[in-house]
Amino acid sequence: MSRGDGRVRAVIERITPAVDGGRFAVKRIVGDEVAVEADCYADGHDAIACRLLWRREGEAAWQETPMRPLGNDRWRASFVAQSVGGYRYTVSAWVDHFLSWRHDFSRRFEPDDLRVAALLGAGLIEGAAGRADAEDAQRLKAWAARLRAGTGAQALKELGLDEELAAVAGRYPDRRYACTFPVEYPLVVDRERARFSSWYEMFPRSAANEPGRHGTLRDCEARLPGIANMGFDVLYFPPIHPIGRVNRKGANNALAAQAGDVGSPWAIGAAEGGHKTLHPQLGTLEDFRRLMAGARAHGIEIALDIAFQCAPDHPYVAAHPQWFRRRPDGTVQYAENPPKKYQDIYPFEFETDDWRALWQELAGVIRFWAGEGVRIFRVDNPHTKPFAFWEWAIAELKREYPEAIFLAEAFTRPTVMHRLAKLGFTQSYTYFAWRNTKHELIEYFTELSQGPGREYFRPNLWPNTPDILSEYLQFGGRPAFIVRAVLAATLAASYGIYGPAFELLEAGARDPGSEEYLDSEKYQIRQWQLDAPHSLSELMARLNRARRDNPALQSDASLRFFPVDNDSLLCYAKSAAARENLVVTVVNLDPHHVQSGWVELDLAALGIEAHTPYQMHDLLSGARYLWNGPRNFVQLDPQRAPAQLFALRRKVRSERNFDYFL
Amino acid sequence: MSRGDGRVRAVIERITPAVDGGRFAVKRIVGDEVAVEADCYADGHDAIACRLLWRREGEAAWQETPMRPLGNDRWRASFVAQSVGGYRYTVSAWVDHFLSWRHDFSRRFEPDDLRVAALLGAGLIEGAAGRADAEDAQRLKAWAARLRAGTGAQALKELGLDEELAAVAGRYPDRRYACTFPVEYPLVVDRERARFSSWYEMFPRSAANEPGRHGTLRDCEARLPGIANMGFDVLYFPPIHPIGRVNRKGANNALAAQAGDVGSPWAIGAAEGGHKTLHPQLGTLEDFRRLMAGARAHGIEIALDIAFQCAPDHPYVAAHPQWFRRRPDGTVQYAENPPKKYQDIYPFEFETDDWRALWQELAGVIRFWAGEGVRIFRVDNPHTKPFAFWEWAIAELKREYPEAIFLAEAFTRPTVMHRLAKLGFTQSYTYFAWRNTKHELIEYFTELSQGPGREYFRPNLWPNTPDILSEYLQFGGRPAFIVRAVLAATLAASYGIYGPAFELLEAGARDPGSEEYLDSEKYQIRQWQLDAPHSLSELMARLNRARRDNPALQSDASLRFFPVDNDSLLCYAKSAAARENLVVTVVNLDPHHVQSGWVELDLAALGIEAHTPYQMHDLLSGARYLWNGPRNFVQLDPQRAPAQLFALRRKVRSERNFDYFL
């Protein structure tokens, strides 16, 4: 008649965190304290007890932590995510007659009442003894016996309310009629780089020192010290596989390639091989392994591009014709978005009857590079392949390599981007490149850091990519590049630049109104003058050092914006370690004019005493300012310094230290 | 490897309305249009199609309605809830290759392209033909054949984009790889009175005309015309069963009853019988049936009180000792909340091993009175019985009597009150009696009408009950009663008063600081002078007439508050029928002083043209005012009229009518 035993009286609701009712996993990193809350209550006035249950994926037994009441039937407990991998958690609650009895007993005064109540309590304690280990059972039985013996009212009351014995009894509750929430909520625990990472993207074929030569992985190896000096910890390459020759595109996306044109690295596959093969001009697998080792020595991880599409001469096309769609004229369907045609690219047909084999083969591509030690994958256009495929493929790979990181390159509608993040992508590209005004930035980053997506969507901000040269960068000059670098590096714990185009302020677009680079590296080899005096490499180094030194910049949940009475000035703060580390960023979004205004910090939210001065240490210029109270004046000249990145240092009470701000 | 077929590419998320992910039912009334929305999308750029699936509970086959896109992957459709009872709904979506093809085809221009695309379309149309009925199949095959024959580009394009034939093909989509959301969301459709009801509570034993005589159901019959004149449509009686004699309470809750004391009707059960028996002094079952018929003739429904607890002499105590908890001294556990004891009341022990029989018996009590024609039940303290019991018992009864209405009398924590509403109670008592200031009222009623509870929690507002004589009423005099009656009748579509105490302005409390009535009818018979000149019966009649005449007052979702520059003045509006019916209420919450201020209506939200005067017709006084623009002055004298209840009438363009406001 009931769904279960009618004596189960406790109910559980609103367990948080949860993504789509437990359909998808919440994300955390190793060492995080995972705080779980739930509404737990029962009918009537009986006391209840609640426990948080959690276990690593695959373990049979739950670990348990008692939850503590927060008021209004809300309960909370937490556990530390101690290792990378999957976890599950849920909540159990029950009417606890021993706790109810103890609460009632404390409010009884009449001797007769106390005597009867003591007998009742003795019964409950004997029940607990029956569930206890031998030693505790002994103590509980003795306690019950003394309650039954019942001496004077006062003595009885003290005996009944004995704290220590209550704690013993509390360890053996009667959970016969406990309610355990039927959903086991999934949690994915990643390593720290999943949340905090600084990416540098470059085309290996442009890495040669001499003009005109095709760069190699060996050339990339030579670049590692410079990239490490800038402070980046992920080095991401566009596809490094053989490039198709059929319908190859020329420079600036010309329909027909000229002799010597190198083609787009995303037109993958040729006679030499496909997704599991290295482009012969880049080097050998041996070179790749050397590069991996060299990067590791510099604290850098190599990230590869997963682009599941084929050039017409990719070996798959002949070997697995059923993986491609045929046009009615018998030719293979190339990518198109009428009237545009991309005849150098064949998409996979995921509706093929042979989809199982296709999925296995594609997962095998990722597994192949994982086998070579690659643990970070930037996935090209994941939103044009089925969601179910990614959910399966990522889970498959993470079962073997739980430390794997997947960055979703999906610039598309919010629902789709969120779905990809929910189903397993570790990080996601964002709309950052097109959010330039104060209002846009506040709205978007408040949503990202405070909205429901905060549990699963980890933004990775890119001021530029080989596909995106924003108008702000095209027309804002050097200040625009600095502004966007500072915003990217401080608004999100993960960010990246496509270099050397970025640090060398490359700003020429192919056509007016286009976001495509002129002479884009997508279609040709470029030569970069890395030691150019205008290079932002020093700024990038300072930004990345600030990020490494300040835990506040290594996660996003604490982001808060503060008012400035000037729409060109943006001010926000992040904090970490119970506000011990505090970083306040002020940016002049106007790359053309000096802007000034009054910043209004929320001192209470930042944990700063109202009437005590505090020091603002600009980590970019090194300057230190003494601020006082919530309102302070700022003025930023885009030509000198369009942004300030303040470590906020509170006054320390002792004045014996020379530097008395912490 | 996938959870299902890997070719299922559409996904569905965020179906609304939904209560706790479909664990509980959304509530509507008969005739409501049930609008369902969902995020539906697929990978890539293919078109998708979505349908809303819905059916009556117990029917095997879904009915289907195509959903239309609202933008950003949100889709919507609705169906009309045509009958009382349970429904289910969910959403199905699929990648629709015919729609994708048609979209692509419209963007093709080259003759070769069009020819190849026409062949592709022909194949899809032939597929649709294979799913179509004979006549449509014929048309589709002919269409496909003409596309294959392929004449000039322009002609081919027109042929391919034929609207009428596309509509035919659209009726036979390929749903092999459709995604149907796995949750079938429950919906409970009630009759109109579930949402819109005006309750009058009275003690039948006080209904006698002569002083000192125990009132009877026959006396109640004589009261029906007066109650109908006041416009109430639900007449609710406290328990009408035999009252226990053991430990009976005396007048004003005296511990020991005097001879002649009638006891509390909630101390149910004595030698004469229990919950299925009428109190002999009230009359016979025959009298009850007459009263039911008489009420029906006056458009009034009788509501009974379901109070699942027993007096010590209730027959259950002897017949089913296992349904009660024993104290260690062998006596039955009476109700207590230490140090308070309620020795005249035995609660049921729901943790009894015999819980199945107990549940059946209690459900049988409700079924017994339903068998007598009762369809409305006010449930006393449901929060002191297990949630699972109510969920089962209400579902059980509604299976047989889907038109049954249950009002939950749970004055307790929000979680508990919401749980009861979610699990099946039709209406709920609220905190209204303790929400008296402008800020409190705006906050609470915004939450009730706009918060997530709006899908399942139907508030029923009571300015007073036999247990609650608020301080506002105790000290505010006649204006306070008027204010609270107007608020109750207009803030919520369901409300009730405990009379005749309310309309006769009964305001004496038993003790200072107490909300208990002095000489409460809970413990003694009272005599009421119904024709007293100070009676508010005429006001109640006007209020209830306004409620019947104005659909705006018959539901809560449209409630909106408007600013008034005086914290004693509250202003709000409700609308219905696409704002054709508009009611604006202005209340002076200060029962002691004249208050005035500027009301600021949101004309755009009310659908009023900015520069056109509109008429405000006070349904309480009958006065009419011409207002203009958003800001208008109001002044309310609590001694004359503490509230105005305006029907807002827009100017009608034709001036040939004498009354040219509608």
Image: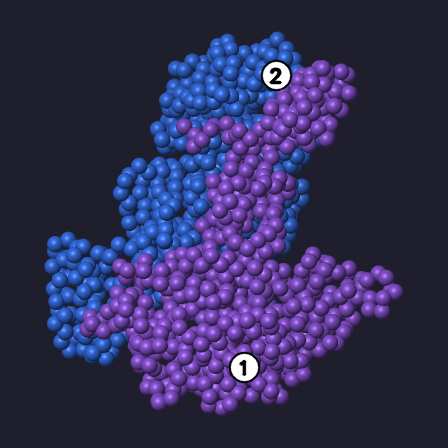
Chain colours: A blue, B purple
Label 2's element? loop
User: Looking at the picture, how far across and down is residue A145, in whole percent?
Assistant: 12, 67
Q: Are marks 2 and 1 on the same chain?
A: no
Q: Which one is in front in this view, the residue at disc 2 or the one at disc 1?
A: 1
User: Looking at the picture, how far across and down is residue A530, in whole percent?
Assistant: 54, 25
Picture quadrant where residue A177 is located:
bottom left
User: Looking at the picture, how far across and down is residue A284, in whole percent?
Assistant: 42, 13
**Residue at 47% over, 22% down:** A355
Observer able to see residue A229: no
**Residue at 45% over, 79% down:** B283
Observer able to see residue B445: yes
Picture quadrant where residue B243 is located:
bottom left
Q: Which residue is mark 1?
A: B500
In the image shown, does B230 or A475 lie closer to the viewer? B230
Q: Chain of mark 2?
A: A
Considering only vertical position in the picture, is B284 above or below B175?
below
Query: Tag on residue A327?
Result: 2
Q: Chain of mark 1?
A: B
Decide: few, some or many residues near mark 2? Use Cα within 10 Å; few <14, some 14-19, many ≥20.
some
Picture quadrant where residue A29 is located:
top left
Considering only vertical position in the picture, is A134 above or below B615?
above
**Residue at 38% over, 39% down:** A189
Decide: few, some or many residues near mark 1? Use Cα within 10 Å; few <14, some 14-19, many ≥20.
many
Compute the Cα span from label 2 to label 1: 83 Å
